[in-house]
Each structure stands twice: as structure tokens, then as C-alpha cells.
Amino acid sequence: MRVIMGAVTSPARRPDDASGDADVMRRIRAGDRTAVDDLYARFRRPAFALARRILADDSLAEDVLQEVFLSVWRDPAAFDRGRGSVASWLLAVVHHKAVDAVRREESQRRRQALAEDEMALDAPTATRDVEDDAWSRVVAEQVRTAMGALSQPQREALTLAYYGGYTQREVAALTGTPLGTVKTRMLSGMRRLKQELGGAARSGALGDVRSAEEPQR
Amino acid sequence: MSADHQRYDELAVGWALHALEPEDEAAFARHLSGCARCA
């Protein structure tokens, strides 16, 4: 299943892809091996983009993709239809495994660095790294909590765009939503995030939370 | 201006997420240079 991920471009996803995705998952659950390849063909581009964004390393990102698709094959029941689209679930799995891979890499590096630096000659640098790490974890935790305050459609739209690397039109096609609604959701979601994260009340694109409520369509 | 600007507020989010279509990206880039609210 390993595929070289060079300059892969695949066509933008179409509105009927979401039901197609669900069909592929059904085939995987039924034990159809070719369905895993189909799932891979459907998602390798955003999945790889996401993993590479987190890992900043092409070959580690490919390893994560292998791990993800293998885990889907082994445990397809992990996808619960009631809880959203195949796309957002699969990308969440990619995100999770990529972050795990980052942690593995980090702890390995840290053990190695520790062994090399027993003399602690560069203690100030090490302290700064630890502080940076701690700060990143705090921010990540705050963002995760704030994401929980969004409506499910807002969260899905922002997750697909940010972590999935999809454009607004692709998000619209993936979720079967009009493009205008996706744009409005992203804006209202970002305003909500800003509010949750205690952003200063400054005017600007994210300034007015109230005006961003989704219009009835 | 607030109602007129809603469209650009939306594009600003897509811009920040690198999620705009090429034509929207071009439109927003033109708008950005002349807009204090977005810049």
C-alpha cells in the first residue's frame, strides 16, 4: 500500500463523495480488501497534508498514513456513523496518530539529548525548550477545549480546512453544504473560538461575535 | 459598511486558513491592501 507521495494532485471532491465514503467503509467492514485501497485513494491527499503539517517530515508522514489505513482495516468498527462524516473521523485519526508520532520522536530525541548532555552544559537552552513545550501544550489544550464549544458543523468546517488542508469549496462538497454556508460557519466558528479563548475585544474580521450567527437558509 | 463587509470577513477567515479558492484569494488580496479593518 506504500505509495510515493510526490506532487500528488487529485481532483476536488464532489458532493456525492460523502455517501461514497460511507459505502467504502461498509465494504471494509465486510472484509473487502480492495476497499482499503479505495479509501486510501480518496483520502491520501488531505491525510498526507495533515500528517506532514504536524510532523514536518515526509517519510514520517507516510509512516503515519500506513499506520492509519492499517488500523482502519483492522478495526473498521471504530468509525461510528452517528458521529459525523467519514472524512472528519478519518482525519481525526490521522491527527491523533501524527501527534503520537511527534511525541515518540520527541521523547526519543530527549532521551538521546539527555544522555549526551549529562554535563548539563547547556542548561539554559534545555530549560527554554521545556518551557516552550509546556506552553505549546497549554495552548493546544485551550484550543481543544474551545473547539468543544463550537457547534458540530462549525467544528467540522474548521477542522477540515485547518487540519485537512481542504479549501472552502472542498469542505462544502465534503459535507454536502452550500459554499456560502461553509464560509459563514467558518467565520462564526472562528469568532466563537476567539471569544472562548478570551481574545481582546478589538474590531476586525473576528470582532463582532453577534453578527456572525448563521442566517436561516 | 458592516453588511457590505460580511463577505470580506468570511474571506478573511479562509485567507488565514489558506482555504480560499484561487479567485477568492485574488479578490481578497485586492481588498486587503485597501482595508484597515482586514489589515
Image (cartoon, coloured by chain):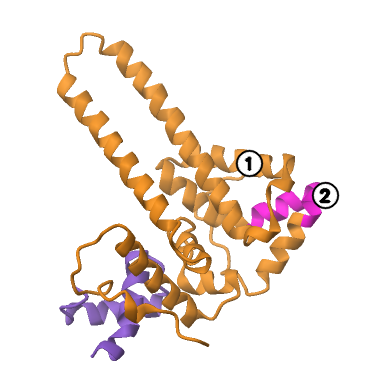
Which of the two discs, 2 and 1, labels the residue nearer the N terminus?
A: 1
Q: Is residue B38 visible?
A: yes
Q: Which residues are magenta?
A: A26-42
Could one spot residue A61 in this view of the protein? no
**In the figure, is residue A100 to the left or right of A196?**
right
Expressed as whole percent of the image width and height from the top left, the position of residue A182 reads 48, 75
* Horizontal and vertical percent position of residue A197: 30, 57
Q: Nearer the viewer, residue A67 or A183?
A: A183
**Colour applied to chain B:** purple
Give the crowd class for mark 1: few <14, some 14-19, many >=20 residues within 10 Å.
Answer: few
Q: Residue at x 27, y 39 (%)?
A: A135
| Residue picked out by circle 2 | A32
Residue A30 lies within the magenta run: yes
Who is closer to the viewer here, A15 or A209?
A: A209
Q: Indicate the position of residue A160 as horizontal and vertical percent values.
A: 50, 61
Query: In which quadrant of the rendered image does the C terminus of chain B lie?
Result: bottom left
- Quote the CA–CA distance across marks 2 and 1: 18 Å
What amino acid is labelled 2 in the image?
Asp
How many neighbours does mark 2 have within 10 angstroms: few (below 14), some (14-19), or many (20 or more)? some
- Residue A104, percent from left and from top: 46, 28
| Tag in front: 2 or 1 | 2
The residue depicted at 45 percent of the width and 46 percent of the height is A52
| Quadrant of the image occupied by residue A62 | top right
Which residue does the image show at 35% across and 76% down from the upper left? B11
Chain orange in the figure, letter: A
Q: Which residue is mark 1?
A: A2
